[in-house]
Amino acid sequence: MDFRLTEEHEALRESVRDFAREVVAPVIAEHYEQHTFPYEIIRQMGKMGLFGLPFAEEYGGMGGDYFALCLALEELARVDSSVAITLEAAVSLGAMPIYRFGTDEQKARWLPKLLSGEALAGFGLTEPGFGSDAGGTETRAVLDEAAGEWVINGSKAFITNSGTDITALVTVTAVTGIRPDGSKELSTIIVPSGTPGFTVAPGYSKVGWTASDTHELTFDGCRVPAENLLGERGRGFAQFLRILDEGRIAIAALAVGLAQGCVDESVKYAKERHAFGRPIGNYQAIQFKIADMELKAHTARLAYYDAAARMLAGEPFKRQAAIAKLHASTIAVDNAREATQIHGGYGFMNEYPVARFWRDSKILEIGEGTSEVQRMIIARDLGM
């Protein structure tokens, strides 16, 4: 096994690292404080081809792989997680369902804009009353055969990239029938932005990720053409399970980036801050804290590398993706806490990146499957 990067992957990582440091870092604190969406940064990311990394060139993609996306996410999150989650959700949850399950017509219509970063898409799965229990979906879509339209009623919660000025669509999971055994038939339907009956609530007031876009969505008699069904009717549950399995690797990469960013900032601060006549980095207590932080980031990185390698090889990877997401999100919170402690009072001030890291880290243990859900997946895969 060789975990060293290819020349292409290394070049990508260096390019995104430079972009994060030179373009994102100087301005992101202001966006974070003002809760504004960084449209100019997103536009430049689109020009770099980041939104098209794991997609075929025939749709405007870069012809790369999912691992390339993960590398980009890690480097962005070393500086800021709001920008990183915007990319992760746009690719893994926005464009990928259309790429995996869409018809030729759907791909031709939506993918070019999504892969260029000209437009964003959201993934409407979570609902206000059910959270991780997707089986509790109450949003319903009824096929009006005479009109050739789906009529959608219901609501979704915590949906990323769903209300920006460049959001083009949201894919929505909805109950489209009841099976003979009494279980719900779930399907996925594309709802373009601006469709009558589709309402985007004001953005949430969030603890972290404040420069990213998150909304509650309401569908009240919302009508879309019957051909907006994404994939086979009744396959919505299987579709989002696959999308979430892949997305967990991406979230793990993002979490590793945040954890590594905590190391970066702590090393820098430990060299600059003096106490009792010496840089605090000269004291073993600080050295050991930072060494443990580096240890955690490194092992979490290996976990997501392994999961990504299995996925790209066409091997089962559900358990490995859950392990990577669980471990990386846990150590991201750990490293953010330790980095804040190393910075002392300055770690509590938003002018220092570690304050953002601390606020951004917790959601990683919740979003795209809580830590408890990851443990359930791992246990079930072990036969329990």
Image (cartoon, rainbow, N blue to C red):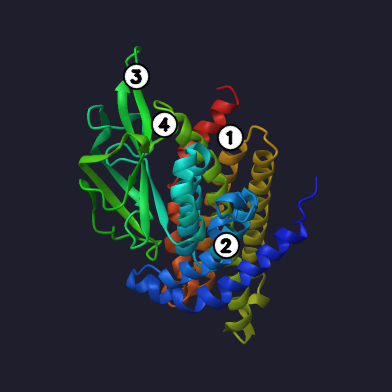
Earlier in the chain: of badge 1 and badge 4, it is: 4
Q: On the image, numbered disc 4 is attached to which residue?
A: 236
Report, in whole angstroms, how far the alpha carbon at label 3 lies from the one at label 4: 13 Å
Q: Secondary structure at mark 2?
A: loop
Q: Nearer the viewer, mark 3 or mark 4?
A: 4
Q: Nearer the viewer, mark 2 or mark 3?
A: 2
Q: On the image, numbered disc 3 is attached to which residue?
A: 183
148 left or right of 242 in image: left
In depth, the one of 58 and 260 nearer the eye is 58
Type of residue at label 4?
Gly
Earlier in the chain: of badge 2 and badge 3, it is: 2
Residue 49 circle label: 2
Earlier in the chain: of badge 1 and badge 3, it is: 3
Report, in whole angstroms, how far the alpha carbon at label 1 lies from the one at label 4: 18 Å
When the figure is inspected, residue 317 is found, relative to residue 46, above or below; the finding is above
Q: On the image, numbered disc 1 is attached to which residue?
A: 318
Q: Secondary structure at mark 3?
A: loop
Type of residue at label 3?
Ser
Report, in whole angstroms, how far the alpha carbon at label 1 lies from the one at label 3: 24 Å
Image quadrant occupied by the C terminus = top right
Q: Are marks 2 and 4 in contact (CB under 8 Å)?
A: no
Earlier in the chain: of badge 2 and badge 4, it is: 2
Q: Secondary structure at mark 1?
A: helix
